[in-house]
Image (cartoon, grey):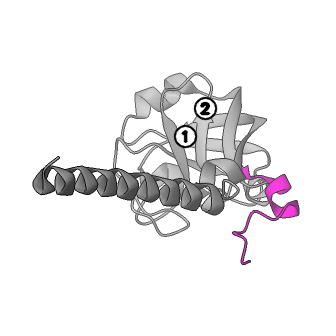
Amino acid sequence: MSVIAYIFKIKGMIRELFLFSTLSVLVGIYIGCKKEDTSPAAIMEWQTLEVSASAYNSVQYQTGSANPRITAWGDTLVPGMNVIAVSRDLIKDGLDYNTPVRIEGLEGVFFVKDKMHHRWKNKIDIYMGNNIQKAKKWGRKRVHIHYLVENIAADIIDVSPNTQ
């Protein structure tokens, strides 16, 4: 075997050893660094609630506001947005500002951007832009809604990364 062939053989063995070592280190790092899943999906869960649902529009006589496009939280409504207003008792139940909500019978995900007068209980109001006929057609009905809340079990178990 010539010296050059011997050098290429050693070089190939070193390359294989390097690749094997690198792979072993990466696998070790992956296994050692794998932590509890702390992604939002792991600490959030969908809750279901039956509520009374009506619809509202960006018109002054319905909102009682000088600017009917401004919500109680200060957001500006634009027709086409998937937005709901919630009664204040539901805020305490986890339907707080920007909570994602699915409404049975309607497509898409809605977001809590508005809150209703204190007199209303267990009620949502679905924003329907300027389409008054669509809101009237919806009327008032009992619906099931599904909304994301923090998983209470995630508060009980330690999901923070190990500091060892």
Q: Which residues are magenta?
A: 149-164
Relative to 142, does residue 112 appear above or below in the rendering? below
Seen at 51% across and 28% down, the residue is: 136
Q: Which mark is residue 126?
A: 1
- Residue 3 lies, in percent from the top left, at 14, 57
Indicate the quadrant where residue 40 lies.
Answer: bottom right
Image-based side of 126 in relation to 151, left or right? left
Nearest the viewer among 68 and 75 is: 75
Residue that protrudes farthest toward the front in the picture: 1
Q: Secondary structure at mark 1?
A: strand
Q: Answer with left or right where residue 124 lies relative to residue 134.
A: right
For label 2, the residue is 103
User: How dense is the environment of label 1, judged by Cα within 10 Å: few (below 14), some, or many (20 and up)?
Assistant: many
Residue 154 drawn above or below residue 108? below
* Alpha carbon separation for disc pair 2 and 1: 10 Å
On the image, the x and y values in percent for residue 106 come to: 53, 26
> Residue 154 colored magenta?
yes
Answer above or below: position of 53 versus 161.
Answer: above
Residue 99 appears in the picture as rendered: no
Mark 2 near mark 1, Cβ–Cβ under 8 Å? yes
What's the amino acid at mark 2?
Ile
Q: Is residue 40 above or below residue 103?
A: below
Q: Is residue 104 left or right of residue 120?
A: left
- State the count of labels: 2
Amino acid type at circle 1 is Ile
Where is residue 131? Give x, y as percent. 37, 34
